[in-house]
Amino acid sequence: MKIILVVDDELAIVDLVTILLEEGGYKVAAAHNGREALATLEHLQPDLVLCDWMMPILDGAGVCRAMQANSRYRAIPLVLMSARGTPPSPAQCVPAAFLAKPFEPQTLLELLARLLSREKTI
């Protein structure tokens, strides 16, 4: 079973995405800011990280840069999501994908399935 780390400071988003992903056959771990996400990566090797772009303490760009700088996490696909609707500039971060909020549940599930199936072939 694939493990997805969901990172968002809005508890309702974490809860809804967790339910959606668990119903989709994924195991879910959660963090509520970027610092918690990086601490979780120390002991959990998720198959993918789904992370909000704008959060307190450490934002999605910080998580992205930390993951890309660490050889243990670099290969883990990172999907950034945001209500801003515009993806980060390449100077800020280069995620595997960007998802604008709000999004349709099926759009999220299809994106994750595509990224995780690509991971097997690399």
Image: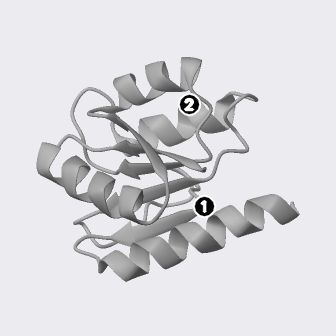
Residue at the location (37% across, 23% down)?
35
Considering only vertical position in the picture, is 77 above or below 38?
below
Nearer to us: label 1 or label 2 = 1
Residue 60: assigned label:
none
Q: Position of residue 105 (x, y in %)?
A: 32, 76
Give the residue at mark 1: 96
Are discs 1 and 2 less than 8 Å apart at CB?
no
Q: Residues within 10 Å of mark 2 (few under 14, many from 20)?
A: some
Residue at the location (39% across, 59% down)?
21
Give the residue at mark 2: 66
On-image quarter of the C terminus: bottom right
Number of numbered discs visible in the structure rendering: 2
Q: Position of residue 108 (x, y in %)?
A: 41, 72
Question: Please, what is the three-letter code of the amino acid marked with disc 2?
Answer: Ala
Structural distance between the alpha carbons of marks 1 and 2: 15 Å
Residue 113 falls left or right of residue 120: left
Q: In front: 57, or 37?
A: 37
Element on which disc 2 rests: helix
Can you tell which quarter of the image residue 119 is in?
Answer: bottom right
